[in-house]
């Protein structure tokens, strides 16, 4: 059985544009490991969701997520907000 490569995707969101989040990076294997490493280096929260990463991997970089993913991505941003709030409360 062939081992599946690690996958990662990064999202960015700029509220001022009132647009949907975009896929700002994606990859598998070494590229995925580098995306995760950079996120950790910049204290960006990481959420592991293999199903969502697989779907995001099908979207071109710098493209907005489709409407069908709004709910799932909103949950990701809610998680990040929660983690950020906990981190700032601990300081």
Image: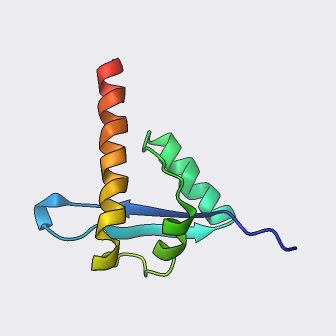
- Residue 60 versus residue 77 in the image, above or below: below
Which residue is rendered at x = 32% and y = 77% of the image? 68
Q: Quadrant of the C terminus?
A: top left
Which residue is rendered at x = 11% and y = 61% of the image? 16
72, 88: nearer the viewer: 72
Which residue is rendered at x = 43% and y = 81% of the image? 60
**Residue 23 found in image quarter:** bottom left
Which residue is rendered at x = 36% and y = 28% of the image? 87
Left or right of 47? Residue 91 is left
Residue 1: image x %, image y %? 88, 73
Residue 49: image x %, image y %? 52, 58
Residue 77: image x %, image y %? 32, 52
- Residue 31 versus residue 47 in the image, above or below: below
Q: Residue placed farthest to the right in the image?
A: 1
**Residue 27 found in image quarter:** bottom right
- Residue 36 versus residue 88 in the image, above or below: below
Scheme by which the image is coloured:
rainbow
Counting the numbered discs, the total is 0
């Amino acid at each position: 059985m062939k081992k599946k490569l690690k996958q990662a995707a990064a999202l960015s969101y700029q509220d001022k544009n009132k647009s949907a989040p975009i896929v700002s990076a994606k990859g598998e294997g070494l590229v995925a490991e580098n995306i995760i490493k950079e996120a950790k280096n910049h204290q960006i929260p990481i959420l592991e969701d293999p199903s969502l990463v697989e779907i995001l991997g099908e979207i071109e970089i710098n493209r907005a997520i489709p409407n069908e993913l709004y709910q799932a991505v909103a949950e990701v941003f809610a998680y990040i907000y929660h983690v950020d709030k906990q981190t700032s409360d601990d300081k």
